[in-house]
Image: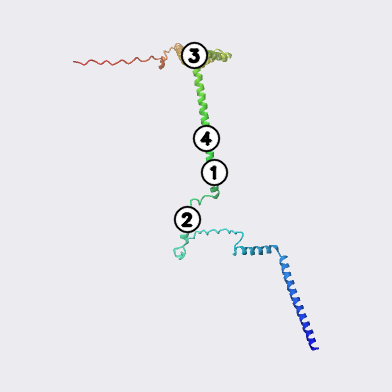
C-alpha cells in the first residue's frame, strides 16, 4: 500500500508542477503578445523615427544625418570703439585701442565697403543698358545727320541743275517765256491797286525772274536804273533847295574792266665800249 501512495503522491506533484509551468509559459506568451500589440498600436511617428534611426545606424554606422542640417555662421564680433582712458587706467594685458585701430585700417582697405548691396546688384545692368542706349542714340544721330546731309545735297543739286537749265543759252525761248510770265504775274498781282503798286509788283516780278534766267544782265539793268533814279532825285533836290549836291560816278565792275595789256619784254641795253 505504501508504494502505491508514494506513486500517487509523485503523480499529483508532477501534475501540479506541469500545470504551474504551463501557466507560467502562458503568462509569458501573453505578456509578449501584449508588448507587440502595444508597439504596433503605438504612435506611427515614434515608430518611423525609430525605424529611420535604426536604418541610419545600419547604413552609415555613425551619427550622420541623412538630411544635412546647415547652421548659419555667426558674424565675427565687431570691435567697438573703446572710451577715452587715462594713461594710468590703460589695461596691461589688453590693447583695445590698438585692436580698434587695426580694425579701422583693415576696413578702409576694402574699396567696396561703402557700396550699397542694391547698387552692386543693379550697377552692371545699368551700365549695360546705358551703353546700349548711348549706342542707339549715337546711331540715330548719325542716321539723322546723314539723312539731312543727303537731303540738303539733293536739294542743292536740284537747285544747281535748275539754275543751269534756266541759264543755258540753248534754252533761250524758255528763259524769255519765264521772264515774261514773271513780269505778267507781278502786273496782275499789283493790278488791284494804284499805279505805284502796279509799278512795284511788275518790277519785282521782272527782277526776280530776270535774276534767275539772266543774272548778269538783270544786275546791270538794276544798277543803271538805280543810278538814273538817284541822279534824277538829286537834280530835283538841287533845283528845289538851290543846292549843288551830286552822286559819285558808278565804278565799273571788275568783270566789265578790260583785260590788262600783255607784259612787254625787257630790252637790255648794249654794253658800253
N-terminal label among 4 and 3: 4
Spatial CA distance of label 2 from label 4 is 47 Å
- In contact (CB < 8 Å): disc 1 and disc 3: no
Q: Within 10 Å of the Cα at label 1, are there few (<14), some (14-19), or many (20+) other Cα atoms?
A: few
| Mark 1 secondary-structure assignment | helix
Determine the residue positioned at 72% across, 71% down. 32
Residue carrying label 3? 170
User: 218 or 160, which is in the foreground?
Assistant: 160
Identify the image quadrant of residue 182. top right
Residue carrying label 4? 139
| Mark 2 secondary-structure assignment | helix
Q: Is 227 displayed left or right of 47 in the figure?
A: left
Q: Is residue 31 above or below residue 4?
A: above
Residue carrying label 2? 106
Q: Is residue 17 above or below residue 48?
A: below
Residue 122, image x and y in percent? 55, 46
Q: Within 10 Å of the Cα at label 4, are there few (<14), some (14-19), or many (20+) other Cα atoms?
A: few
N-terminal label among 2 and 4: 2
Residue carrying label 1? 126
Amino acid at each position: 500500500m505504501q508504494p502505491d501512495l508514494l506513486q500517487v503522491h509523485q503523480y499529483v506533484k508532477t501534475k501540479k508542477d506541469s500545470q504551474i509551468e504551463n501557466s507560467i509559459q502562458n503568462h509569458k506568451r501573453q505578456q509578449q503578445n501584449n508588448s507587440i500589440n502595444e508597439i504596433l498600436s503605438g504612435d506611427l511617428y515614434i515608430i518611423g523615427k525609430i525605424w529611420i534611426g535604426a536604418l541610419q545606424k545600419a547604413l552609415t554606422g555613425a551619427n550622420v544625418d541623412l538630411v544635412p542640417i546647415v547652421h548659419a555662421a555667426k558674424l565675427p564680433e565687431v570691435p567697438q570703439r573703446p572710451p577715452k582712458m587715462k594713461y594710468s587706467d590703460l589695461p596691461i594685458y589688453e590693447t583695445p585701442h590698438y585692436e580698434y585701430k587695426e580694425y579701422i585700417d583693415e576696413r578702409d582697405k576694402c574699396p567696396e565697403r561703402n557700396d550699397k548691396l542694391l547698387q552692386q546688384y543693379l550697377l552692371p545692368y545699368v551700365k549695360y543698358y546705358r551703353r546700349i542706349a548711348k549706342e542707339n542714340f549715337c546711331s540715330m544721330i548719325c542716321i539723322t545727320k546723314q539723312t539731312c546731309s543727303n537731303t540738303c545735297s539733293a536739294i542743292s543739286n536740284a537747285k544747281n541743275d535748275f539754275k543751269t537749265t534756266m541759264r543755258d543759252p540753248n534754252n533761250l525761248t524758255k528763259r524769255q517765256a519765264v521772264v515774261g510770265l514773271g513780269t505778267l504775274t507781278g502786273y496782275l498781282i499789283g493790278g488791284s491797286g494804284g499805279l505805284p503798286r502796279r509799278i512795284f509788283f511788275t518790277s519785282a516780278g521782272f527782277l526776280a525772274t530776270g535774276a534767275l534766267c539772266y543774272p548778269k544782265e538783270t544786275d546791270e539793268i538794276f544798277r543803271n536804273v538805280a543810278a538814273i533814279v538817284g541822279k534824277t532825285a538829286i537834280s530835283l533836290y538841287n533845283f528845289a533847295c538851290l543846292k549843288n549836291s551830286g552822286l559819285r560816278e558808278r565804278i565799273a565792275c571788275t568783270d566789265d574792266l578790260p583785260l590788262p595789256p600783255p607784259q612787254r619784254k625787257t630790252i637790255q641795253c648794249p654794253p658800253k665800249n
